[in-house]
């Protein structure tokens, strides 16, 4: 006869228990990731502001910060707009981190499990897929805050969050908040795929090959983040400058760039292909510590919550 435990009802119950067990851990994961991200962005935001100024330099009526260089840009902002100007757009940045980064970091482990990429010997491409998918989902949630943040950082007059939002809304309606969404999703997939897969893989390599104090705990996590940060900067810089240019187009003038591909081609042909990596140093200087801090806090919080980060 049929064994009572194998009835469909039992199977369903088992499946539901697995789903229920996953739900709180996904929420905990999102919470840990969001907390880590908000703390990190507060430290890193000034570098981001400088990077944005360098990227929009010379477009429209923006000042040419590129010729001032890194130090020149910093001292100009400090002299003319005050030290607080380095934190322009921080409320939007907090909201972006709380939405986008919590998805991006927090969904990696659950999605990796879903894709069956959670074994030690899982191929890099599957980890990349899990990271890419969580990044892509996050960027859809975070796009409006991204636009607010980019505009607030690029503005020399220092508009507040509400003023910036209502100016976008009155000029372009809701669609204005999804400007540059194609560039942003692409950037997020490449960015987060590289980040999580390189971090995950580097962690394994550092553990196996690095000398003693470096191969465990915080030093290992920091070293792995630093390596992941370099590769991220290489792959993501072109998407990033295109995204910044697309998002920062003036609301009331005719469009300069139509979409991601158009922006790529225009920058590469008009300013030379190397212009796509403009701001590489401030970008790595931002990505390496951001990645390191985010992942360290995230590992810390997930450990406190008793779940695994990657």
Image (cartoon, grey):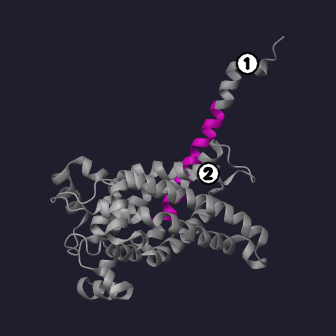
Give the answer, above or below, for where 6 lies relative to 81.
above
Instruction: Determine the residue positioned at 76% across, 74% down.
Output: 210
Give the answer, above or below, for where 144 lies relative to 67.
above
**Residue 26 in the figure: left or right of residue 169:** right
- Which quarter of the figure has residue 41? bottom left
Mark 1 Cα within 10 Å, few/some/many (few <14, many 20+)?
few
Mark 2 Cα within 10 Å, few/some/many (few <14, many 20+)?
many
Q: Position of residue 67 (x, y in %)?
A: 31, 84
Q: How many marks?
A: 2
Q: Position of residue 213 (x, y in %)?
A: 75, 78
Instruction: Determine the residue positioned at 82% across, 17% down.
Output: 3
SS at badge 2? helix
Residue range highlighted in magenta: 16-38
> Which residue is under mark 2?
109
Q: Position of residue 20 (x, y in %)?
A: 60, 37
Q: Is 181 part of what is drawn in magenta?
A: no
SS at badge 1? loop
- Which quarter of the figure has residue 202? bottom right
**Residue 140 in the figure: left or right of residue 209:** left
């Amino acid at each position: 006869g049929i064994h009572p435990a194998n009835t469909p009802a039992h199977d369903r119950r088992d499946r539901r228990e697995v789903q229920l067990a996953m739900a709180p851990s996904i929420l905990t994961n999102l919470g840990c990731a969001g907390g880590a991200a908000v703390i990190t962005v507060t430290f890193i935001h000034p570098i981001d502001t400088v990077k944005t100024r360098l990227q929009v330099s010379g477009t429209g009526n923006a000042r040419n910060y590129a010729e001032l260089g890194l130090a020149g840009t910093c001292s100009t902002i400090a002299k003319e707009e005050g030290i607080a100007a380095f934190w322009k757009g921080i409320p939007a940045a907090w909201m972006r981190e709380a939405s986008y980064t919590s998805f991006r970091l927090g969904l990696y482990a659950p999605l990796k499990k879903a894709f069956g990429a959670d074994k030690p010997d899982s191929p890099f491409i599957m980890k990349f897929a899990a990271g890419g998918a969580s990044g892509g989902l996050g960027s859809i949630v975070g796009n409006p805050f991204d636009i607010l943040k980019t505009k607030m950082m690029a503005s020399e007059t220092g508009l507040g969050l509400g003023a910036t939002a209502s100016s976008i809304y009155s000029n372009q309606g809701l669609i204005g908040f999804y400007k540059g969404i194609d560039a942003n999703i692409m950037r997020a997939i490449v960015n987060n795929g590289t980040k999580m897969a390189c971090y995950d893989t580097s962690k394994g390599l550092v553990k196996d090959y690095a000398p003693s104090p470096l191969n465990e705990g915080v030093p290992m996590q920091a070293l792995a983040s630093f390596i992941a940060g370099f590769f991220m900067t290489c792959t993501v810089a072109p998407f990033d400058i295109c995204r910044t240019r697309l998002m920062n187009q003036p609301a009331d003038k005719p469009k300069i760039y139509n979409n991601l591909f158009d922006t790529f081609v225009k920058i590469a042909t008009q300013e030379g292909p190397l212009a796509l990596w403009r701001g590489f140093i401030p970008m790595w200087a931002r990505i390496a510590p951001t990645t390191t801090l985010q992942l360290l806090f995230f590992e810390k919080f997930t450990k406190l919550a008793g779940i695994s980060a990657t």
